[in-house]
Amino acid sequence: MLKTLAVAASALLFAATAHAGTLTAQGSLKADQPGPQISRYIYGQFSEHLGRGIYDGVWVGPDSKIPNVRGIRTDVVNALKDIHVPVIRWPGGCFADEYHWRDGIGPRDQRPVRKNNWWAGSPETNQFGTHEFMDFAEQVGADPYISINIGSSSPTEMREWIEYMTSADQDTLANERRKNGRDKPWKTPFLGFGNEAWGCGGNMTPEFYSNELRRFTGFYHRSDDNPTVRIASGANSTDYNWTDVVMKNAGGNIDALSLHYYTIQTGHWDKKGAATGFTQQAWTDTFANTLKMDEMITKHSEVMDKYDPKKRVGLFVDEWGTWYDVEPGTNPGHLYQNNTLRDAVLAAVNFNIFHHHADRVRLTAVAQTINVLQAMILTKDDKIALTPTYYAFKMYVPFQDATYLPLDITAPNFTMGDKTIPAFNASAARGKDGHIYVGLANMDPNDDVALSVDLGSVKAKSVSGQILTAARMDAYNDIGKPAVVAPVAFKGAKLAGGKLSITLPAKSVVVVELQ
Ligand code: AHR
């Protein structure tokens, strides 16, 4: 019996590793048929009052020994500046629809402590409120995206918050803001009208929410010097009926509709799978699930096209990323998970998908920036780790506000257990610097891909690039230690005879630059 088990185990191991090799693929770049701009806001962040996302992650307070500017961690701000974060969504999430803005203004020692009902009932001290968030966004150089409480608030509360933030006049709310330390009005380029209204944001039907949306947007007063994108709470993953009803009933009252889709390795919320120490099957299942993003965007866009064929209304994927079981020993309601090479490759797969839909997808926000879900940064006291996902964001910076270029690819599939998925995906763009960038994500944990791309009209003189990979699929960067998953120069690309040849290693992210 023991022997049989041993043989079975070694056969499994063999099946998982034996077919390492090189797949082949062809592509052609259509640089003479440029597409839409890839909005820089596709590289946005979501930061909620959840676990150690804000407190510890961003806010340590002005008296902390951890270096900070007005209470906001300097190490975190500097790291986020380096990946050119364009927008930060705050204060939630589910938290947003229980948030009352007055709790978070005025002298910090007089602010109320509330229960954070969505996230483990943890005490919400309100030390981080409107002024602190706006300061954080300004320090990072990002635009603020404020998610407004629709579920348990009123149009009056909403209108007064917006007036408090944006009025340049001598009115009572603007003067209260001045008394609290901010003379110049802020801008609110993005306002979200509720979050997950179908769930934690009020348990509404799409019909009821559409009416609420019409009511709240009716009391939002646009001004020419503060143009705002009004974002409706959108569908949960494949709920196309939600998109249909909201677009039909309130499409004229909004400028964008959101979509939330989390990648769950197992597909089951009760047992989501571990962030580290996973099998090749778990790796493959994760990618099979994340690839559904493409179909969801396509189908939601088709519904939107019925009511908005000119694509005035954007589809904003303002919550996406991996969601695993929490790290053992941490609070289950704080959603703290580790972050590995798998997450970085998955981020790049999603970037490539978003680029292909750049005509409709003009903002996304990964969940979440620090210490929560698929984070860019993990912190422990005064130490931080920049995660593999962080580095995927960094490698893709040249795609921000670049011009989409069609790249037709025939990708080979690979099969693991009951899943067959493409070995890689890719996208191309002409950057603001005029250079051409190709981003590639190899989802195959074993096989390299030898890719040959016909460059068509492009006469490139040189190619360079960066690669992110590691020996282990679950390699991660330990807090306070040198990074083991970080980009290095890529030597696997060559130019010859009007073709770009790339050898794309298994389980890697590669970005190449043509000049
Ligand atoms: O990101 C964590 C939670 O996921 C958000 O608060 C909510 O909007 C979503 O369900």
Image: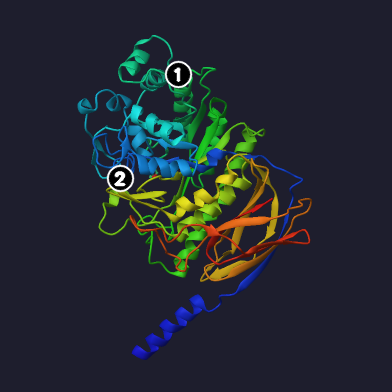
**Which quadrant of the figure has residue 413?**
bottom right
Q: Which image quadrant shows ligand 1?
A: top left
* 282 on left or right of 123: right
* 398 on left or right of 211: right
* 225 on left or right of 326: right
What residue is pinned by disc 2?
52
Task: Decide which of 307, 227 is in the foreground and name it.
Answer: 227
- The colour scheme is rainbow
Secondary structure of the residue carrying tag 1 is loop
Question: Alpha-carbon distance for marks 2 and 1?
Answer: 34 Å
272 up-or-down from 140: above or below: below
Secondary structure of the residue carrying tag 2 is loop
Please tell me the numbered disc located at residue 257: none
Residue at 38% over, 50% down: 373
369 up-or-down from 277: above or below: above
What residue is pinned by disc 1?
219
Question: Counting other residues with Cα less than 10 Å from the Cα at mark 2, is it few (<14), some (14-19), or many (20 or more)?
Answer: many
Question: Counting other residues with Cα less than 10 Å from the Cα at mark 1, is it few (<14), some (14-19), or many (20 or more)?
Answer: few
Task: Tell which circle, 2 or 1, labels the residue nearer the N-terminal end.
Answer: 2
Residue at 64% over, 36% down: 306
Kindly identify the amino acid type of the residue bearing the numbered disc 1: Phe
Residue at 57% over, 35% down: 314
Res 149 visible = no
x then y, percent, for residue 231: 50, 31
